[in-house]
C-alpha cells in the first residue's frame, strides 16, 4: 500500500491525537487513560468492518509506525526518569521477592500451561512469547489506582510500586532473551548469560553513571539553558542515542530509553536564568516582614528546582498516545468471532490473575490480597511485547489480538476489585 | 534507497537536533539561529564529498522528510500565533505600502531580469519561482536584529515588522498561484483570482473567526485543561487539520498552519487549575500589608494568563530545526564549483538587496535606509519556496542550491549593515 500524502498523514495524526485525548475521559470512570486509548484504537481500527475503510492506511504508514515507536521510546524514558532508586531501596527485599515471583510464575504458567493446554497448535517460541507478555505489571496503572484511593504511602503500595518497576526491568531482560531466541532460532545458556549481562550492564551502568555524574549533568543542563529549547533537545537526544545504542548491542530500543531515564533520574538543576516571575516577586516582597519573606523565598526556591521530567512531559503526553491508539488499531475483532477463542481468552486471563495474586503471598506483615491484586494490571510493557512478537512474526494477528484483550481485561478488573480489598484492609 | 531502520533513524534525528542546537551558537556572533542550522546542514549534507557518506540516507528518508514538514508546519503556526493584528493596524498604511513594493519589485526583477538575463536556459516557470523565492522578508530575523539593537519600538522597526508579516502573507498567496501555474501548466486570470480568493478567504476568515470566537475558544482551552496535555493536543490538532484543509483546497499546508495560528492568536485563557505556586504564594502572603499583597497578586495574575504560543513553543523549538538542517543538507556544494555560477549568485544577491532597499523609499518621515535594509533578510519562507520548487521539479538541485546561498547572503549581510545604519540614524 502506498504511503499516504504528507497532508493526509497530518490529518491522521490529528485524528489519533484527538481520539486519544477524548478517550482519556475513561479516567472519570476510574479507568486509566491508556485503556481508553486502546479502546478508541480498537474502534478506529475495526471501522472497516462496518464499511468505513478511511483509517486503514494508518496501519501501513511507515511514518505513523515511526511516530508510535518514538512515542513508546519517550514513554519508557519518562518511566526511567520517574523511577526513584532511593525509594526502591527502602522496600527493597520484599519488592524484589514479589517481583521475581510475579515474573517467574506468569512466565512458567504462560509458557508451559497456557501454551500447550489452551493453544497447542502454536510453536514453542510463540508459547515463550505468551509467557513473556504476561510478566510485566504496569507501574503507571498501579500507581494511578493507589493514588486515587489515597493509599500511595501504605507499605503495600510501596511494595507493589517497587515490584512493578523491578519486573519492568526483568521483563525488558526477558524480552531481549526471548527476542534473541526467536530471531536466532535457539540460544545457548552462554548466550542467555551474555544477553542478561549486556542488559544488566546497560541498566546498572546507567544507574551508576547517573548517581556519579548527576551533579555534573545538572550543571551542564543549567549551562545550556539559553532559552532555545537546548535543555529539551539535550535530554531528548540522550534518550534517542541510548535507544540506538541498545539496539546496536541487541537489546530493545525501550531498554536504552529506560536506561537513559535512569541516568538522568537523579539530575536536578537550577534554571540558568531564573524565570522573571521569581525576580518580580522578590522585588514586590522585598519590604515585607522577614518571616513572610522567608516563606515566599522558600516556595520560590522549591518551584525553581527543575527536573528533566518537566521538560519531556509536554512531548511525552502528545507522543505516547500515538503508540497505544495504533496498538489498539492492530487488534482485529474479526479474529475473535470464534466462541472457542473467547473461552481461551478467559482461561489466559484467569492464569494472568492467579500468577500475580500468588506473588502477593510471598511477603509477610502486609495485606497480601492488596499486594497481589496490585500486581495484576498489565499494561504498556505487555503491549510492547505483544507488538514486538507480532513484528517478529512469532505470533499472528489473532494471538496478538487475544493477548491485547487479556491485557485489557486485567486492567479493567483491577480498579474495582483493588478498591474493595484496600477498603476491607483498613 | 531503502528506509533506514527505526533505531538508526532515531540516531539521525538525535544528531540533527544536537547539530542544530550547537549551530545556534552563531547567535553569539549576532547571527540568527536559522543561519547556523542551515550552515550545519550544508556541512552534514556535503560530508560525502570528503568520503563520509554516513548522513546520505537522511536526504532520502520519508520519515525525516515528514518530520521536517511537520516542523515547518508548526513553525508557521507559531508565526501566526505571534502575529499581533492590532499592532499591525497601527503602522497600517506605511507597512502595507512597503510590503507591496517589497513583494512586487523582487517578483518582477526576479522573473523578468534575473531569470532571462542571468539564467536564460531556464523555463519561464523557473523564472517565476526565482522571483517568488525573493519576495518574503523573514519576520523572525528582522525582529531579532531590531531587538538586539534596542530599536524595536522605533517607527522604522514597527513598519518593517508589519511589512514583513504582510509580505509573508502575500508571499504565501504568490506560492499558491505560482505552484498552480507550475502544476497545471498555465492558469487563466480567473484561476489566479480564484486562488487569491481562496487564500484570502482562508486567512481573513481565520482572523475573523479568531476575533469573534476568541473568548469561547479561550474558555474551551481552560475547560479541557485536565493535566493530560489536552490543551497542547487540541492546539496541535487544530494546526494539523487546518494544514490538511489548506492542501485540500489547493493551498500550501503552511498557509493553513499560519491561518490556524491567526485563529488562535487572540486566545488567552486562565489555566483551569491555577499552578500550585500561585496558591502557595497567596497563602504565604495572606498576612502581609495590603499594598505589598496587591503587588504580588498583580504579578501572579499576569503570569497565570496563558497563551497558546506557550504550549506550542517546546515542540516548535525541537521540530523546526529539523526542517532547516534538512534544507541545508540538500544544498549541494558540487553544483557550485563553476565560477560563472558564483557570479550569477552575486548578481541575484545584488537584485535581492536593491529590490528590498527600494521598498524602504516609498514611505516618508522615517530613515528610509533603516526601513530598506530592515526588509533585506530573506529566511524561512524563501527557503520553504525553494524547497517547494525543488519538490515540484520546476527548479533543479543546482538552482535550489544557488538560491539557498542567495538567501543566506541576504541574512549574513543584514545584521552588520543594519547595525551601522540604525546607529547613524540616531
Image (tube, coloured by chain):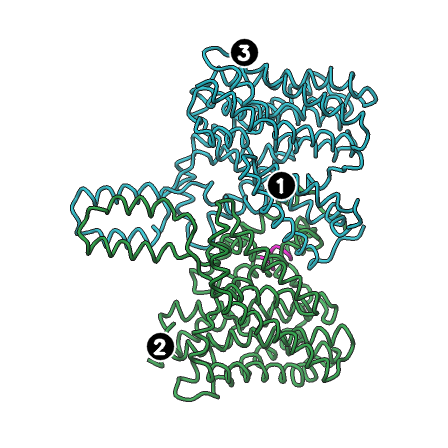
Chain colours: A cyan, B green
Q: CA distance from mark 3 to mark 1?
A: 34 Å
Closer to the camera: disc 2 or disc 1? 1
Magenta-drawn segment: B41-46
A158 to the left or right of A354: left
Chain of the residue where label 3 is placed in the rendered structure: A
Q: Percent from the top left, x then y, of residue A26?
A: 57, 39
Q: Please, is residue B50 above or below residue A406 in the view?
A: below
Chain of the residue where label 1 is placed in the rendered structure: A
Q: Percent from the top left, x then y, of residue B339?
A: 65, 73
Residue toward you, A414 or B242:
A414
Task: Report the disc number at residue B416.
Answer: none
Task: Report the disc number at residue A37.
Answer: 1
Q: Percent from the top left, x then y, of residue A312?
A: 50, 44
Q: Please, is residue B297 above or below residue A174 in the view?
A: below
Q: Which residue is mark 3?
A: A362
Helix, strand or loop for disc 1 = helix
Residue toward you, B117 or A388:
A388
How many marks are shown on the rendered structure?
3
A156 to the left or right of A129: left
Q: Which residue is mark 2?
A: B423
Chain of the residue where label 2 is placed in the rendered structure: B
Amino acid at each position: 500500500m502506498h504511503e499516504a500524502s504528507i497532508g493526509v498523514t497530518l490529518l491522521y495524526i490529528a485524528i489519533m491525537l484527538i481520539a486519544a485525548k477524548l478517550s482519556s475521559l475513561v479516567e472519570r470512570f476510574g479507568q486509566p487513560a491508556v485503556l481508553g486509548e486502546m479502546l478508541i484504537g480498537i474502534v478506529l481500527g475495526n471501522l472497516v468492518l462496518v464499511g468505513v475503510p478511511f483509517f486503514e492506511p494508518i496501519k501501513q504508514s511507515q511514518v505513523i509506525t515511526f511516530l508510535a515507536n518514538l512515542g513508546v521510546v519517550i514513554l519508557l524514558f519518562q518511566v526511567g526518569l520517574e523511577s526513584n532508586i532511593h525509594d526502591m531501596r527502602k522496600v527493597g527485599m520484599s519488592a524484589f521477592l514479589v517481583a521475581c515471583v510475579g515474573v517467574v510464575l506468569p512466565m512458567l504458567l504462560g509458557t508451559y500451561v497456557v501454551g500447550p493446554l489452551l493453544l497447542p497448535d502454536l510453536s514453542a517460541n510463540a508459547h515463550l512469547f505468551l509467557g513473556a507478555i504476561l510478566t510485566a505489571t504496569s507501574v503507571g496503572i498501579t500507581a494511578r489506582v493507589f493514588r486515587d484511593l489515597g493509599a500511595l504511602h501504605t507499605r503495600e503500595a510501596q511494595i507493589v510500586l517497587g515490584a512493578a518497576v523491578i519486573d519492568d526491568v526483568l521483563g525488558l531482560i526477558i524480552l531481549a532473551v526471548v527476542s534473541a531466541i526467536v530471531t536466532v532460532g535457539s540460544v545457548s545458556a552462554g548466550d542467555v548469560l551474555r544477553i542478561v549481562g549486556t542488559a544488566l550492564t546497560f541498566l546498572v551502568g546507567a544507574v551508576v553513571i547517573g548517581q556519579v555524574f548527576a551533579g555534573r549533568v545538572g550543571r551542564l543542563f543549567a549551562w545550556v539553558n539559553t532559552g532555545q529549547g537546548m535543555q529539551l533537545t539535550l535530554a531528548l537526544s540522550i534518550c534517542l542515542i541510548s535507544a540506538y545504542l541498545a539496539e546496536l548491542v541487541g537489546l530493545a530500543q525501550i531498554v536504552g530509553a529506560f536506561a537513559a531515564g535512569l541516568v538522568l533520574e537523579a539530575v536536578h538543576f537550577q534554571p540558568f536564568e531564573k524565570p522573571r516571575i521569581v525576580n518580580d516577586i522578590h522585588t514586590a516582597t522585598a519590604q515585607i516582614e522577614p518571616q513572610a519573606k522567608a516563606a515566599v523565598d522558600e516556595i520560590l526556591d522549591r518551584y525553581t528546582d527543575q527536573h528533566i521530567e518537566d521538560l519531556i512531559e509536554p512531548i511525552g503526553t502528545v507522543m505516547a498516545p500515538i503508540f497505544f491508539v495504533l496498538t489498539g488499531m492492530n487488534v482485529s475483532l474479526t479474529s475473535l468471532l470464534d466462541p472457542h477463542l473467547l473461552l481461551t481468552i478467559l482461561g489466559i486471563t484467569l492464569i494472568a490473575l492467579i500468577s500475580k495474586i500468588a506473588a502477593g503471598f510471598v511477603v509477610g506483615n502486609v495485606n497480601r490480597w492488596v499486594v497481589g491484586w496490585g500486581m495484576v494490571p498489565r499494561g504498556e510493557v505487555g503491549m510492547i511485547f505483544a507488538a514486538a512478537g507480532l513484528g517478529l512474526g512469532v505470533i499472528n494477528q489473532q494471538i496478538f489480538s487475544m493477548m491485547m484483550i487479556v491485557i485489557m481485561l486485567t486492567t479493567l478488573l483491577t480498579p474495582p476489585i483493588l478498591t474493595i480489598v484496600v477498603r476491607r484492609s483498613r
